[in-house]
Image (tube, rainbow, N blue to C red):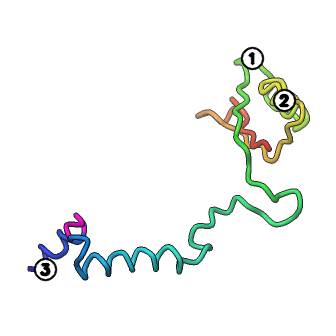
């Protein structure tokens, strides 16, 4: 009996004019309107004027095999502008990508 009720609930087999259908619709609406926004906060938005919008995208700047082992932030930003062909881009964050031996093989760059 209980298993069949659960099965009907998950498979939504109730007709539209039954009280079970009305209860399920009310529960869905209650979830939509009563759920706190903090449950869905992903942490990308930060306070402050320069952090009003979330990150636009992430760019991966790969280094050639015999390339420079470490690039300055200004050089990484210059390369991102060349790769994207957008001189107005601002770099938000730079992370190093390392291989198995700990050698830098690329930079992961968050841009706005």
Q: Callout 1: 10 Å neighbours few (<14), some, many (20+)?
A: few
Find the magenta span and give its range. Answer: 10-14
Residue at 83% over, 42% down: 91
Q: Which one is in front, 76 or 92? A: 92
- Tags 2 and 1 touching, CB below 8 Å: no
Residue at 32% over, 76% down: 24
Quadrant in the rendering for residue 11: bottom left
Seen in the image, is 41 located left or right of residue 89?
left
Q: Is residue 11 magenta?
A: yes
- Could you tell me what secondary structure mostly forms the magenta stretch? loop
Q: CA distance from mark 3 to mark 2?
A: 61 Å
In this figure, which residue is indicated by the disc labeled 2? 86
In this figure, which residue is indicated by the disc labeled 3? 2
Q: Is residue 107 magenta?
A: no
Q: Residue 84: give its label.
A: none
Q: Which one is in front, 39 or 100? A: 39
């Amino acid at each position: 009996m209980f298993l069949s009720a659960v099965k009907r609930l998950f498979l939504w087999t109730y007709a539209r004019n039954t009280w079970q259908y009305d209860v399920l619709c009310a529960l869905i609406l209650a979830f939509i309107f009563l759920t706190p926004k903090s449950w869905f906060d992903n942490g990308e938005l930060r306070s402050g004027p320069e952090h009003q919008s979330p990150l636009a995208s992430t760019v991966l700047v790969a280094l050639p095999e015999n390339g420079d082992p470490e690039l300055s932030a200004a050089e990484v930003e210059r390369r991102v502008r060349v790769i994207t062909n957008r001189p107005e881009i601002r770099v938000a964050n730079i992370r190093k990508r390392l291989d198995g031996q700990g050698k830098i093989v690329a930079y992961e760059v968050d841009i706005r």
